Amino acid sequence: MKGVTVLYDESRKKRLVQIDMEVVVRKREELEEMLDLLVAESRKDDEMVPWEKAKAMLKKAGKL
């Protein structure tokens, strides 16, 4: 996306996202979708937690 730059570290891992503020104002929905994809990609190898366990943890933390 024009106005959005993903910066990599020495080992070619994505580390930073640089966003032109004009993109934030004019293309907010597209930007949110792109950021959601980047977060999902970064978490693809994370341990899966069953929904029931996650829901119980959220309730215990007072977030549900």
Image: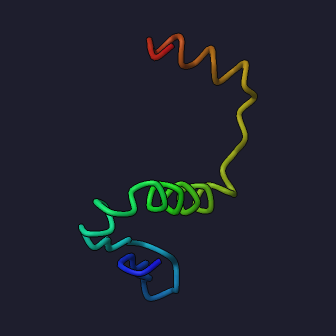
**Residue at horizontal 54%, vertical 54%?**
36
Furthest residue to the left?
21
16 and 18: which is toward the camera: 18
40 and 15: which is toward the camera: 40
Q: Is residue 53 above or below residue 46?
A: above
**In the figure, residue 2 lies in which quadrant?**
bottom left
Q: Is residue 45 left or right of residue 61?
A: right
**Residue at horizontal 69%, vertical 21%?**
53
**Residue at horizontal 62%, vertical 14%?**
56
**In the figure, residue 54 lies in which quadrant?**
top right
33 and 61: which is toward the camera: 33
- Where's residue 3, x and y in %? 35, 78
| Label tally | 0
**Residue at horizontal 57%, vertical 18%?**
57
Display colour scheme = rainbow
Q: Is residue 15 above or below residue 48?
A: below
Q: Is residue 61 left or right of residue 37?
A: left
Q: Is residue 49 left or right of residue 5?
A: right
Furthest residue to the front?
26
- Where's residue 8, x and y in %? 44, 82
